[in-house]
């Protein structure tokens, strides 16, 4: 993927960095919960590290978060389970998901309504399900329970061809986040720009783009000409709406590109996103190309937090608490190690000094006996006096 450079936003990069650690530990949490007795061998987690884009030893990573994971030795093998505080948050998360079911139904319906034929591939939805907060069993917990809205179709019989289809169109849901905001403010729907005033050229391009009428992402795109300004307007609105439906107002550009046919996205989606830096922020942090909705953030914090995000942030706080505890222990251990090394060096220096003092004293006494007049007289007397004993 050829990607132009975009000026780094330190605060949004910090948000991505914080979120990355959370995503990794959340995946480890799900792996442990899916394991029999909810206790996984560390060796098993080590094999999963490659899929998590992690390097190094799994045991070292787990020990960095003692408030989240409990590692213990059984026989000659290490095992890991979630801490009691972590299990409490898991229960709270499940409770919130249960209450959020109507919201998940609406999100799923809106995604299908934006697609060309009101159908989306199930495997593609699975790639982004956690972005939208959908539970792992959403096909049973949401789709199967709402047969009046959704149905599963599979014309070829292959698992990879399974699609989710919208049965009934709800006009009340065909309202984008931009249109809802404009209705509250009593204004015409339009995009907002979140750039410093010093970005003069970018502001000029944004005003030019925003001067044409807004096109809803729920409008059928087949009446628009590919490559036209109207099609670009509709596509920018569609990506804006998709990001608005996500928990963290962000998504992988690569995964969004998998929906190119269903959402009538351009082949080079990254180029389109980079043309609109006031609306989107594109980052390649961790070599993962991600697009964020700028207006969704105030600095490095989300403007509006979904109830599920609030629970997940508690998990992040617990993770940070554990990391702080680990770093403090590591610091104190290193300090003790340095102290012991220092004491050893002090003892060695004292021994050297003592040895040096003794050596100098011996040398001084030897030289003193040679130059002492009385000693010299006795020496010659013994040497030349035959009568001397």
Image (cartoon, helix red, strand yellow):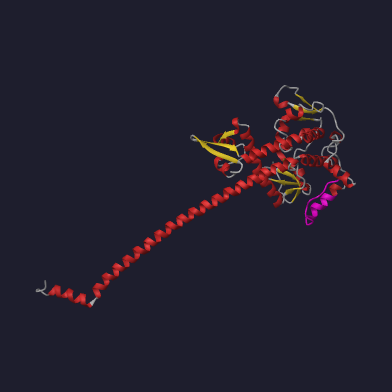
**Front-lying residue, 302 or 145:** 145
The quadrant of the picture occupied by the N terminus is top right
Residue drawn at the location 69% of the way across and 44% of the way down? 313
Q: Quadrant of residue 37?
A: top right
Say which quadrant the C terminus sits in: bottom left
Does the image show residue 344?
yes
Q: Residue at x 85, y 49 (%)?
A: 208
- Look at the picture and state if 387 lies above or below 268: below
Specify whether 199 is left or right of 333.
right
Q: Is residue 198 magenta?
A: yes
Residue 223, position as x, y percentages in the image: 87, 34
Where does residue 259 sit, x and y in percent of width and height?
Answer: 75, 34
- Please tell me in which quadrant of the rendered image residue 41 appears: top right
Residue 234 sits inside the magenta stretch: no
Q: Is residue 277 left or right of residue 34?
A: right
Can residue 8 be seen here? The reply is no
Q: Residue furthest left?
A: 387
**Residue 233 x/y as whole percent:** 83, 42
Magenta residues, as a range?
A: 189-207
202 shown above or below 269: below
- Residue 345 falls in image quadrant: bottom left
What number of labels is visible?
Answer: 0
Tell me where residue 167 appears, x and y as whole percent: 82, 27
């Amino acid at each position: 993927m050829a990607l132009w450079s975009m000026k780094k936003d330190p605060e949004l990069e910090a948000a991505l960095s914080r979120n990355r650690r959370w995503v990794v530990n959340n995946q480890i949490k799900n792996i442990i919960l899916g394991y029999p007795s909810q206790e996984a061998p560390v060796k098993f987690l080590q094999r999963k590290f490659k899929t998590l884009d992690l390097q190094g030893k799994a045991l070292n990573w787990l020990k960095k978060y003692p408030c989240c994971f409990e590692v213990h030795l059984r026989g000659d093998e290490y095992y890991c389970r979630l801490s009691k505080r972590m299990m409490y948050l898991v229960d709270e998360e499940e409770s919130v998901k249960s209450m959020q079911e109507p919201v998940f139904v609406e999100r799923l319906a809106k995604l299908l309504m934006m697609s060309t034929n009101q159908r989306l591939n199930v495997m593609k939805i699975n790639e982004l399900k956690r972005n939208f907060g959908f539970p792992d069993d959403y096909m049973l917990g949401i789709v199967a329970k709402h047969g009046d809205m959704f149905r599963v179709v599979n014309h070829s019989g292959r698992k990879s061809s399974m699609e989710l289809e919208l049965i009934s169109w709800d006009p009340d849901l065909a309202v984008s986040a931009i249109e809802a905001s404009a209705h509250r403010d009593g204004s015409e729907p339009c995009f907002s720009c979140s750039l410093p005033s010093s970005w003069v050229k970018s502001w000029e391009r944004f005003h030019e783009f925003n001067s044409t009428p807004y096109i809803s992402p729920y409008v059928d795109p087949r009446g628009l000409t590919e490559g036209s300004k109207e099609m670009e307007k509709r596509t920018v609105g569609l990506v804006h709406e998709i990001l608005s439906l996500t928990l963290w107002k962000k998504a992988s550009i690569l995964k969004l590109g998998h929906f190119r046919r269903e959402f009538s996205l351009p082949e080079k989606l990254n180029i389109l996103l980079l043309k609109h830096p006031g609306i989107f922020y594109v980052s390649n942090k961790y070599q993962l190309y991600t697009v964020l909705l700028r207006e969704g953030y105030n600095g490095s914090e989300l403007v509006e937090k979904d109830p599920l995000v609030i629970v997940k942030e508690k998990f992040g706080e617990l993770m940070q608490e554990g990391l702080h505890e680990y770093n403090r222990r590591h610091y104190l251990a290193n300090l003790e190690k340095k102290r012991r090394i220092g004491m050893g060096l002090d003892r060695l220096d004292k021994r050297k000094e003592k040895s040096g003092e003794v050596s100098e004293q011996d040398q001084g006494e030897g030289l003193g006996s040679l130059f002492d007049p009385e000693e010299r007289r006795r020496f010659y007397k013994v040497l030349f006096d035959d009568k001397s004993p």
